[in-house]
Image (cartoon, rainbow, N blue to C red):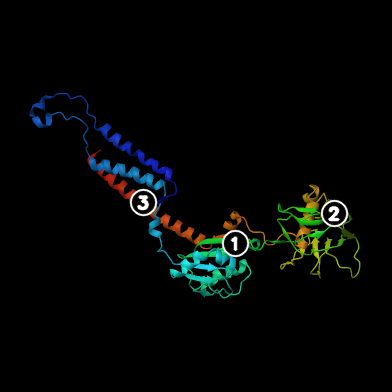
Amino acid sequence: MEFLEPLLLWGGLAVVIPVGIHFWHQKRGKVIGWAATQWLTEKNQQQHRGLRLENLPLLILRCLLVLLLALLLSQPMLTWLNAKPAGQKIHLVLPNPFLVDNFRFELDDALRKGEKVYWIVPTTEPTTALTQLPAQQPANPLLVQASINQLREQGTLKQNDTLYLYLVNNAQYRDIPYIHVPAHFLVHAVIDSGSRPVQRYLVASDNGNVFVNAAGQLTNSPTMPSRLRFSTQPVHTGPIAVLLDYRNKAEQQTVAAALQALADVYKIDLTINLNRIPDKPYQWVLTDRLITTPVPQTLYVVSGGNQAPILPTPNIRYIDETLTPQTTELVANGQLPEWLGELLVTQFGLQPATTPLSRVQWNDLFIRSDSSLKGSETTEANTTEQSYLVLLFVMVLGIERWLALRTNA
């Protein structure tokens, strides 16, 4: 049994109150002899020493009322009534050699016990041996969710089962908010140390390298840190062509100044055009006009409150405000160059895509999909138990009142 308000159980100590009142009312006054005293038998004239318990059933009922009231206020939950029988153990494994080798003991033990083991593949295949792995699948979180859904739809995975997930931890899981598991689960995750993330970089105008360092900051350095593994070729060399196509000249001057500040800090060679040059490819277009035919390789930043389409285009970023000090805090607080730097990192993919999640992020990623259902069932069961306790309290109170009136106590 569990209690929602266990501290209120201390109210049960108030049971001493009816006991004290009971003995107080039993106190006798001074004995005064009267004429008919001689007719009393010697037995009734004997003095009784110590405390005597009179109307014992009434005293028990009153103590029981106090205990029931304390129990009601503590809101008990009889969890053993709602307990379900233990289900089976199911293991869902990503067919990654490093992952399988790392948890081979656990998986071999599961197969010996006859527990079900499935591969995370498009068809969610069962297996009885770990000697031959299916074709390795990329660590795609959508594939993990699809495999879980398949087990549930097939009736293999039930609410009282326990699902053991074996996954490789990387940043692809950042792309989704949650992975829903309709059962009890335990996640085993490893970071494949044999494949360090590949870091992309740009070549700056001073021949330095522009990349995101281990602290997650954009930096320019002539040397590459040895603890990071960089790509063999820079993602871009030479000037970055930028087009500022604004009808609002104040906004155009503000954005141009922010781009210049970004170029000065990181020595990035930005070629800024205020008018479009025909047939010239642009890596970056910042405008307050609606984009109708975007070029896939170009990043567009559209400001001024242009309505974003229902199906957004990945390479178009919309911002509601006009980029001037009077219209947005982003400019007024001097954060526009930093924001443009984040867009630069996104445009050229400078942020490592395979950075693993932290322990807290990894634990928060998986949730029970039936949590709301379980909560409602628990609330309903708790309400039923409270109703029974209230009914018992009323019945005991009625019996106590009837007995008290009958005995005039």
Is 11 rendered above or below residue 300? above
User: Which residue is label 2 attached to?
Assistant: 267
User: In the depicted view, which residue is nearer to us: 213 or 340?
Assistant: 213
Q: Residue at x 27, y 40 (%)?
A: 59
Q: Mark 1: few, some, or many residues within 10 Å (few <14, many ≥20)?
A: some
Marks 1/2 in contact by CB < 8 Å: the verdict is no
Q: Secondary structure at mark 1?
A: loop
Q: Residue at x 34, y 42 (%)?
A: 66
Q: Position of residue 264 (x, y in %)?
A: 86, 52
Amino acid, disc 2: Lys
Q: Mark 3: few, some, or many residues within 10 Å (few <14, many ≥20)?
A: some
Q: CA distance from mark 1 to mark 2?
A: 39 Å
Labels 3 and 2: the sequence-earlier one: 2
Q: Position of residue 84 (x, y in %)?
A: 41, 62
User: Which residue is label 1 attached to?
Assistant: 178
Amino acid, disc 3: Leu
**Quadrant where the C terminus is found in the figure:** top left
Left or right of 338 on screen, residue 390: left
Amino acid, disc 1: Tyr
Q: CA distance from mark 3 to mark 1?
A: 40 Å
User: Which residue is label 3 attached to?
Assistant: 389
